[in-house]
Amino acid sequence: MSAPREIAERLLDAQVDFLLAEVTGDRFAEVVARDTQAVLAVADTLVLRDMVEIEQAKDSVRTVVDLIGGSPVLADLVGVLADSVYDHIATNHDYTLGEVVDREPVEALLEKIFGMHQAQERILDRLTESPLVAAVASKFVDKLINDFVQANRERAEKIPGVSSLMSLGQSAANRARKAADNSFVGDLAGKGALFALKRTNNAIREMLRDAPVHDAAMEFWDLHADEPVSGLREYLSRKDLNELVLHCYEIAVTTREKEYFGLLVDECVEVFFTKYGDYTLAAMLPELGLIGDDIAKEILRYGPAVIEGAKKNGVLAWLIRERLAPFYTSDAVLGILADE
């Protein structure tokens, strides 16, 4: 081996050892702190809009949503996590619902929902366009009336002679119902269903606007707030929760594939750049709730174990050597060493 190449090999060995020492023991923490600060100092000079083009950002976000949203890991974990939450987390008797969820935001949310009169009006108006919903409303109103009539019938039949009179009336009503088939009365029945729906809608409108629905809802919340979280399992079986989560996941996955969802993602990126495009990369960290120490802390949390594992089996030294060897064995370096 020529003298220049031998010197180059010795220099390469020395630098590999030096870099291994940089990521070992207490020295690693010092290096992470130093390099984190150096990176942040550079990031403080780089404006987001200058570093990333908005179209690039749109493509990146779409790719992340597409790859992660449809990843096999997420698909496999959704149902398993739902079962695990039901079997373990939801059995907790140490925390009450009120301790887990504050009352104030719940009250504000319900107040907003019940105050959304425009949305309520639109929903109720669209319901009148559905024949099936009209039929359901008609059945609901009929049920209320029938229950009322039945209750009063039971009282009336206690009066002598009234029972026979009511039987005669029921017989006449049955004959009228048969005559309704394929007749003008049948058309009236259809209109009656629509009428029932409108009456139901009006009742809902009045209830939401005038009745203390918000107070009733909060009273319902308060009844549960002091109960253990485990009490929520009384509302859902394990199978119900699993299937609900899977159905929601399926909706999310299939929606993610639609072109319209891509437009929503693009709009989110546009809004983000409008608000934060002129920030430096370093200035973005506080907006994300992070500081340099947080980044260093997380690196130190996982880095040592990964590096130590790679160091033990010799992979780390081999990777460092592979990256540096082309430099030390290059003609330029060998020429310099030969001149020396």
Image (tube, rainbow, N blue to C red):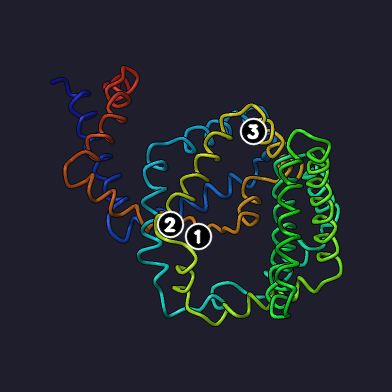
Of the two numbered discs 1 and 3 on the same chain, state the one appearing first in sequence.
Answer: 3
Q: Please, is residue 14 above or below residue 100 in the view? A: above
| Cα distance in 3D space between marks 1 and 3 | 33 Å
Mark 3 — residue? 261
Element at label 2: helix
Query: Which quarter of the figure has residue 84?
Result: bottom left
Q: Are marks 1 and 2 in contact (CB under 8 Å)?
A: yes
Q: Nearer the viewer, residue 46 or 151?
A: 151
**Which residue type carries mark 1?**
Asp
Number of the label disc, if any, that sits on residue 271: none
Mark 1 — residue? 294
Q: Name the residue at 72% across, 79% down.
A: 160
**Which residue type carries mark 3?**
Phe
Q: Name the residue at 47% across, 74% down.
A: 231
Farthest residue to the bottom: give it. Answer: 226
The nearer-to-camera label among 2 and 3 is 3
45 horizontally vs 242: left or right: right
Name the quadrant of the C terminus. Answer: top left
Of the two numbered discs 2 and 3 on the same chain, state the one appearing first in sequence.
Answer: 3
291 horizontally vs 112: left or right: left
Q: Name the residue at 69% across, 40% down.
A: 268
Query: Which quarter of the figure has residue 257?
Result: top right
| Cα distance in 3D space between marks 1 and 2 | 6 Å
**Which residue type carries mark 2?**
Glu
Mark 2 — residue? 298
Return the x and y of residue 51 as percentages of the image width and height.
Answer: 64, 34
